[in-house]
Image (cartoon, rainbow, N blue to C red):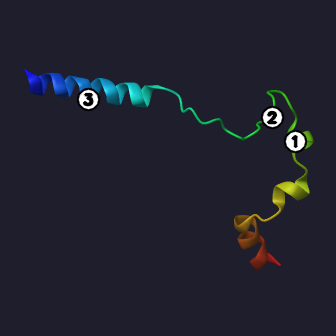
Amino acid sequence: MTIQLTKTAIAVLLLATFSTPPLAKSHDQLPDTGTSANGTMSIGQELANDPLLTQYIKPTG
């Protein structure tokens, strides 16, 4: 009976741990719904330091 109680307690604790939202607050600031992307970030800011884009453009000249 003790083994069954232990298994149940562990299952309940794991479920409680993974079902709660994280306590740390995110510092990411997402734009409000309906905000145009143009007002959020300029094209220059968007393309700066993009290694995938640089890898694509470099061979084309």
Furthest residue toward front? 2
Q: What SS does tag 1 mark?
A: helix
Q: Secondary structure at mark 3?
A: helix
Q: How packed is label 2: few (under 14 Cα within 10 Å), some, or many (20 or more)? A: few
Q: Which residue is mark 1?
A: 40
Q: CA distance from mark 2 to mark 3?
A: 40 Å
Within-10-Å neighbours for mark 3: few <14, some 14–19, many 20+: few
- The amino acid beneath tag 2 is Pro
Q: Residue at x 44, y 26 (%)?
A: 19
Residue occupying the point 7% across, 20% down: 1
Residue ID at (73%, 70%): 56
Position above or below: 35 against 56: above
Q: Quadrant of residue 32?
A: top right
Q: Give how far apart the Cα atoms at labels 2 and 1 are.
A: 7 Å
Residue 47 higher or lower than 12, as above or below: below
- Left or right of 13 in this view: 41: right
Query: Do the CB atoms of the residues marked 2 and 1 lie less than 8 Å apart?
Result: yes
Of circles 2 and 3, the one toward us is 3
Amino acid at the residue labelled 3: Ile
